[in-house]
Structure formats: structure tokens, C-alpha cells
Image (cartoon, rainbow, N blue to C red):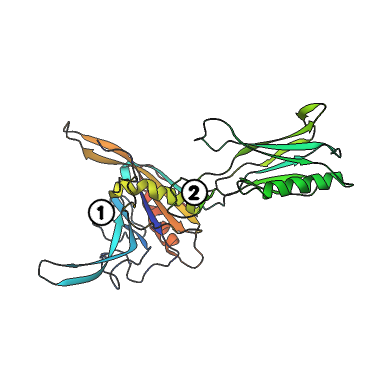
Amino acid sequence: MLQRTNKLLIGKDISRDAHVVDDAVITTTTGSTGLADGEVVVLDKYFKVLTAGYTIADTDIIYICQGTGTTYDYVDEAGTSVTTNRKILLSDPIEGKLVKKFTGISYAAKAEQVTTITPDTPVSGTEYLVRIVYKDMNEHPGQFTQTYRAVATGVDVDANLIDLLIAKINGHKGARVVASGTTTLILTGKPIPECTTSVNDLEEFRMVEFEAFINKVSATTGRWEDSGSVVYTSAADYGSGTWEQVRDMEKRALPYLGVTNFTMFPVKQPDMRTVKNTTYDLIVIEHDKSYISPDNQYIKQAPLTTVIAFVVPTTGTQETSVLAVLNPWMASCPGAFDNISL
């Protein structure tokens, strides 16, 4: 039985090649008849470039095609050497009558959690304790916490206490937040290095999420909660179209390319197409695939998802070119999908 399959095509910030014209035949040869590295085109059911303005009446099935940076040579049956062929990636067939959703998601930057602590009027000689409880570490069997202590001293007690706490937190190599502020203590989540360092990171992208508390400690009265305020200024925002998210989508789709063993290192897999520190717009097509299963003689359907990630354009125009072809075709489907503008 077919399972849900995700296919990801990644386009670069380039413009359409001159040879990619309506009804053109795309070949794997690099140069005048082939796709460029990172070039994405929409094909009709005959694998020709879909003509702008065509509808489901012209071709009931389309494909999304992407050129990659991988090339290869081979010798054909006649003994002729054919060199520098570009490997291309092809989506599953997208049947117009079975398209369920057509969505565009513009890039939005991620933002770390920010929490602001305002202690009550500090008392010189009193020890203050800031406790941070992390909520994003699902692998930890209990609460993972970090605690920082400072004794309020000096003439300008407010500022001195904040300075002491900032020094304690930022001086801790294992701290998962950055501290700042003057009369208030501002805690900002840090990027997690295990999932924000490389396109080859083993862990999936996540962000630091935490609760913060401030207590006082006294040798005579013990420990009690400070009467100041803790304000959750802004929650962690994962954004959309970040390179970490696109990388994770690409990694999840690797098994559909035959990469099924991720435990025996080094893992044999294609080069990652996601580029670190790059931002992406996303086009998501949710659709079904018709097929005849071995257990019967009637047609079944399996859910599929095709995602196109375009580098947010600065000079290139291929994102606009693809939408100019996709929008009319999707509007003509039974779902009558609205045009996407990114």
C-alpha cells in the first residue's frame, strides 16, 4: 500500500533560461537544452514545459522538475559517449482532479523567546536567585533547569544586581540564554548548536523555550519568591521558510530517494540541496495519487505532498515564472484554487 510521500524541489535565485520556453522538451544535457542547477519548471503530462495559461483541459496531469548540481557521463547503446548530463528531480504526478490544497508561504524570520525580569527593590546583602526551567528538552526525563545566584551590593543596588546576574549567566559556557539589560534582566534564548550549525546536523530544528523565576535567599528567613515581575515579552517564533526548516523537510524526504539507513556512518546520501543561512518562500501542493493495488481491481488513492522551496528572490525571476504557469492551471482545477503571490 502506498504511504504518504513528500517530495521537495529547491529552486535557486536565478532567472529562467532562454531555452525554457512553452512546449519545450527538457533534456538532461547541460547547456542549451537542459536545466540549470537549481532551475525549476512545470511540465505537462508529456513532460514538455507547460505553456503559460494552460488549464486542466489542456493537460490533466503536471509534474514539477528541478535541475541539480550533480552531473554524470554515460555511453549509449551505439557506443557514443554522452558527457555532463545533469541529474534532474521529478515530482510525483499531480492530477488536477485530485489536488486538495494549493498554498503559498512567504519567508518569515525566526525569533528567539525573550523574557524580562524586574526585581523588587533589591536589598544590599540579600542573595538573589534566578532559576530558568527549560521546556523544549523533550528527551530529558524531568525538568532541566539552570540556576544563577548573586548578592546585591553597592550604592546603586538595582544596577549592580543586574550587572552581577548578567555576568553570571553570560559567563556560563553551558547557558542556553543570553542576558542583557540595565535595571531589568532580559533573557533571550540562544540558537541550539546541535540543530542550527549545518545542513548535516543530526537533530531537527527546535528553539529554546523556558520559564523564569526570581527568588530571594536569606540565612534567617530561607528562600522565598521575589515580589518583582516576570514578563514573557515574546514567545519563540519558528518563522517559516528558514534554512533549518527546509533542511529538515529535505532530510525527511531522503527515504523516498532510497536513503533508508541513517545509523551506519558515514551515511550514503545525495549532497544536501539546502543552503545554510538562505531564506525560502514555499509553495505546497497537497494532492492524491491514483493507483491500482494488488488486492483488488479498482482504483485507490494515496495522499502525497509536493513542496517547492524557492530562495527568496533578489535578482532572479524564476519564482515568478513558475507561479505564472501554476496559478492558471490550479485555478482551473475542480478545487478552483486562489492565485498565490509570494
Horizontally, is 7 left or right of 149 in the view?
left
Mark 1 residue type: Lys
Position in image of residue 275 (x %, y %):
45, 59
Real-space Cα separation, disc 2 to disc 1, in angstroms:
39 Å
Horizontally, is 187 left or right of 310 in the view?
right
Horizontally, is 258 left or right of 142 in the view?
left
Q: Identify the element where label 1 is drawn.
A: loop
Q: Mark 2 highlights which residue?
A: 195
Q: Identify the element where label 2 is drawn.
A: helix
Position in image of residue 303 (x %, y %):
33, 39
Q: Mark 1 highlights which residue?
A: 45
Position in image of residue 173 (x %, y %):
62, 49
Residue at 78% in and 33% down: 216
Q: Which mark is residue 290?
A: none
Residue at 30% in and 73% down: 31
Residue 95 visible within the image: no
Position in image of residue 62 (x %, y %):
30, 52
12 w.r.t. 201: above or below: below
Chain-order first, disc 2 or disc 1:
1
Horizontally, is 240 left or right of 97 in the view?
right
Instruction: Indicate which label's residue lies in the foreground, 2 or 1.
Output: 2
Q: Are marks 2 and 1 in contact (CB under 8 Å)?
A: no
Farthest residue in the top direction? 221
45 w.r.t. 301: above or below: below
